[in-house]
Image (spheres, rainbow, N blue to C red):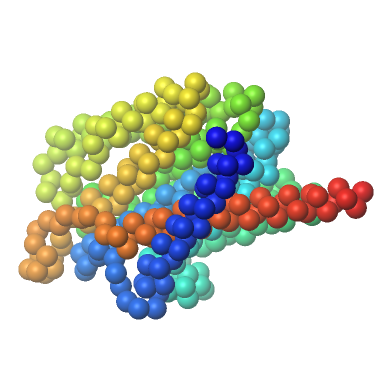
Amino acid sequence: MKTGNFNLLFLALSAAGLLFGGYFAVEEWFVGPSFATNDGLVWTLPLVTYIFLALASTGISFLLTCGELLNNESIKTHKTLLLITALSLLIGAFAALATELGSLFHLFWLVLTPNLKSPIWWMGTLYAIELVLLGIKFYALLIKRTFSFERWLTAGTLCVAVAASLVLGSVFGTVVGRVGFYGVDASILTFLCALASGMSLAPLLLSPDKRAVLLLPGRLVLGALALLLLVNYIYLARGSIPAEQPWVSLWMPLLLLVALITYQTKPAISTIVALPTLLLVELAFVIQGQQHVLGPKQTWLGMMQSYQPNLAEVGILVFGCSVAYLCFFILKLLMARFEAQISSAR
C-alpha cells in the first residue's frame, strides 16, 4: 500500500476514533461518570492514556532536544516531524486527562490553583510548560525564523521534559500508605518508559538512511527497561506483603527484548510490539497500587479489588490517540501550506 493510502487510512480511523471516543468524553463531561472507578480505585485507563501519551511525547522531546544540542544532523534533518509528533502526543494526552478530571475547566484549575507540595500540580504544570515551549519551537519553524534564545529554548525544553517524566512517577512514588507505589523506582520506571516510548516511535519518523543514530540508544533503553521489569518480577514473585501485589508478568520484559532484537532489521515490528507493551506496563503499575483497599472502605469493597476496563474507558484511550493523530495531520498540513506560501513568494 502506498504512503498516501496509509495516510488516508489512518486519517479515516482517527476521525472514526474521535467520534467513538468523543461520545464517551462528552458523556463524562456533561452527563455523568461512566468509568470503572470507585472510592478505592480512582486511577484507571483514562489516566493511563494520559500517562502513555505524555511519556511518549517526553521521549520524542528528549530525542529532538538532545539531537539539536549535540548538533546531530540525522535528528536535525527530521526536526519538523519530531517536533510535530511531540506536540501532537502531548495535546492528545491533555485531551485524555480532561476526560479523567471530569471537566474541561478542571485542567485550568489544576494549573491556576497551585499547591506547591503536590506532585500532581507539578506534573500538570510542567507538562503545560512543555506544551508551551514546544509550541514556541513550532511557531519558529512555521515562520522560518531562528530566535536568538533558540539554544536556551531547546535546553529548557529538555530540562522540563525530563523533570515532568520524573515528577509524574513521584505522583505515585510519594503516595502514603500505598506500598506498591511508594519509592523512587516509580520515577525511574516513568523516565525509562518515556525514553523507551520515544525511541520505539522514532524509527517510523526518521528516513531509513538516518536511523543508525537510534540503534545504540534505542536498544540500550529497551534493554534497561526490560532489566528493571525482570528484577521487579523476581522480587515481587518472592514478596510476602499483602499490600504489594505482583504487577510485572514475565511476558513484559520478554516482549521488550523482542522489540530490542527487531529494532534494527524490522523497526515497524519493533514499534508495534513495544508501544502496546509499554501501555500495558504503565496500566499494570497504576492498577496494582490501588488493588489493596485501605481502612473502612474494606467493609463494602473487600480486602482486594480486581479491575477490567469498560467500554467508556477504552473509548477514552481511542479518543486520546485519535486527537494526537489528527493534531499531527493538521500541524503537518499547516507546515506544508506555510512552506508552499513562502516558496511561491520567492
Which quarter shows the N terminus?
Answer: top right
Left or right placement of residue 284 versus residue 295 in this view? right
Q: Position of residue 257 (x, y in %)?
A: 36, 26
Say which residue appears at 49% left-offset and 28% top-offset.
267
Say which residue appears at 44% left-offset and 24% top-offset.
262
Q: Position of residue 108 (x, y in %)?
A: 51, 72
Left or right placement of residue 250 versus residue 216 in this view? left
Say which residue appears at 37% left-offset and 67% top-offset.
24
Quarter of the rendering containing residue 47: bottom left
Q: Is residue 302 visible?
A: yes
Residue 309 or residue 114, whichever sits in front: 309
Quarter of the rendering containing residue 206: top right
Q: How many marks?
A: 0
Q: Position of residue 174 (x, y in %)?
A: 33, 55
Left or right placement of residue 287 versus residue 215 in this view? left
Note whether 140 is above or below 255 in the view shown. below
Note whether 112 is above or below 49 in the view shown. below
Note whether 258 is above or below 344 in the view shown. above
Say which residue appears at 49% left-offset and 21% top-offset.
265
Note whether 272 is above or below 288 in the view shown. above
Q: Pick out the residue farthest to the right.
A: 346
Residue 104 or residue 7, whichever sits in front: 7
Q: Position of residue 130 (x, y in %)?
A: 58, 55
Q: Is residue 114 visible?
A: no
